[in-house]
Image (cartoon, grey):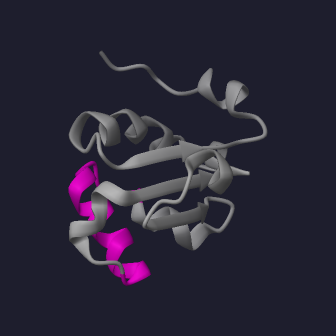
Amino acid sequence: MIRDFAGTPAHAIVLSLGKPGIRRYFNGSDDIQTIVEALFLACNFPAPSIVHTLLFIDEIQKDTETIQLLRYFYEEIPVFYVIRASSILAFVMQKVPVSL
């Protein structure tokens, strides 16, 4: 369904934070460029293709640190599309501290 909604991106990175090993890409760093580069390396994608890439993060409720980073993807790399999904996201959002 996500791929149908997004069209046909050149590259799609589909992650589930239900898998603890996946969280390592987002935890411990707030440098969005470094996170994206690590994801591209892990998927063996060329870095110049960032404008044609969709990142789909499922089970995002498993990691509040990743939730907090989401806004920075758009602010720092607006051509990199991110979709997140969660079965209980509204519940988790109540627990995420808001920083202004």
Q: Position of residue 96 (x, y in %)?
A: 53, 27
Quadrant that contains the C terminus: top left
Q: Using the rendered image of the protein, determine whether residue 28 is visible from the camera's viewpoint.
A: no
Q: Position of residue 58 (x, y in %)?
A: 65, 53
Q: Nearer the viewer, residue 23 or 5?
A: 5
Q: Which residue ends up furthest to the bottom in the rendered image?
A: 44
Name which residue lies at 71% across and 42% down: 86
- Is residue 42 located in the magenta-colored stretch of the structure? yes
Q: Which residue ends up furthest to the right in the rendered image?
A: 87
Name which residue lies at 76% across and 35% down: 88
Q: Position of residue 48 (x, y in %)?
A: 21, 68
Name which residue lies at 69% across and 61% down: 18
Q: Nearer the viewer, residue 92 or 5?
A: 5
Q: Is residue 19 above or below residue 86?
A: below
The image quadrant that residue 35 belongs to is: bottom left
Q: Which residue ends up furthest to the front in the rendered image?
A: 8
The image quadrant that residue 79 belongs to is: top left
Q: Nearer the viewer, residue 63 or 49?
A: 49
Q: Using the rendered image of the protein, determine whether residue 5 is visible from the camera's viewpoint.
A: yes
Name which residue lies at 58% across and 44% down: 84
Q: Is residue 100 above or below residue 93?
A: above
Q: Position of residue 37 (x, y in %)?
A: 27, 68
Q: Is residue 92 above or below residue 63?
A: above
Highlighted range, magenta: 26-44
**Is 70 positioned to the left or the right of 64 in the image?**
left
Q: Which residue ends up furthest to the top in the rendered image?
A: 100
- Is residue 55 located in the magenta-colored stretch of the structure? no
> Number of callouts in the render?
0
Label the magenta part by its dominant secondary structure. Answer: helix
